Amino acid sequence: QVQLVESGGGLVQAGVSLRLSCAASGPTISAFVMGWFRQAPGKDREFVAAITWSGRNTGYADSVKGRFTISRDNAKNTVFLQMNSLKPEDTAVYYCAAAGTLFSRDIYYTPQQYSYWGQGTQVTVSS
């Protein structure tokens, strides 16, 4: 059973950067597509970014494209989300997720495509 733990969230002002980390324990996540999602109060969970197992392919929501970067270190079983130029509308709980399909070259954009989830880390951006 893959266990995911997010860290790096916090309260920041608009325009600054944060780096979220997702550390996995249990089986290696090196063969899985990894994704970041977020959920603001009263809203559905939405896709933010994803990366294939090799790191060669990435995908981003239009709202974060050019500001956020997803990366992974398979040797450390960790995935990162670098968030730059943060905006108040980025405020949400951010979740890390692992898709169960092995060695996929596709990016997965929906929560239903992911099998394992972390507990989330709160990101609050003040104006």
Image: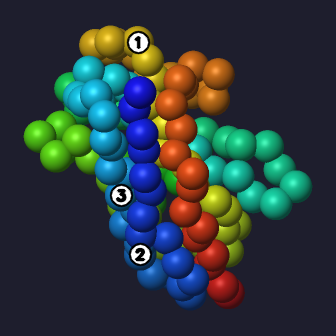
Q: Which mark is residue 101?
A: 1
Q: How is the image coloured?
A: rainbow
Residue at horizontal 63 percent and vertical 76 percent from the top:
124
**Dot 1, how many residues are within 10 Å of its Cα: few (below 14), some (14-19), or many (20+)?**
some
Q: Nearer the viewer, residue 3 or 94?
A: 3
Q: CA distance from mark 2 to mark 3?
A: 13 Å
Q: CA distance from mark 1 to mark 2?
A: 32 Å
Q: Is residue 6 rendered to the left or right of residue 30? A: right
Q: Nearer the viewer, residue 125 or 23?
A: 23
Res 123 → quadrant: bottom right
Instruction: Check if mark 2's residue and mark 3's residue have beta carbons within 8 Å.
Output: no
Mark 2 sits on what residue? 17
- Whichever of callouts 1 and 2 sits on the residue coming sooner in the sequence is 2
Q: Nearer the viewer, residue 112 or 119?
A: 119
Q: CA distance from mark 3 to mark 1?
A: 22 Å
Q: Position of residue 125 (x, y in %)?
A: 62, 78
Residue 48 visible in image: no
Name the kind of residue labelled 1 in the image: Thr
Residue at horizontal 88 percent and vertical 55 percent from the top:
42
Name the kind of residue labelled 3 in the image: Ser
**Dot 3, how many residues are within 10 Å of its Cα: few (below 14), some (14-19), or many (20+)?**
many
Q: Which mark is residue 21?
A: 3
Indicate the secondary structure of the residue bearing disc 1: strand
Indicate the secondary structure of the residue bearing disc 3: strand
Res 18 → quadrant: bottom left
Residue at horizontal 49 percent and vertical 70 percent from the top:
9
- Whichever of callouts 3 and 1 sits on the residue coming sooner in the sequence is 3
Residue at horizontal 11 percent and vertical 40 percent from the top:
75
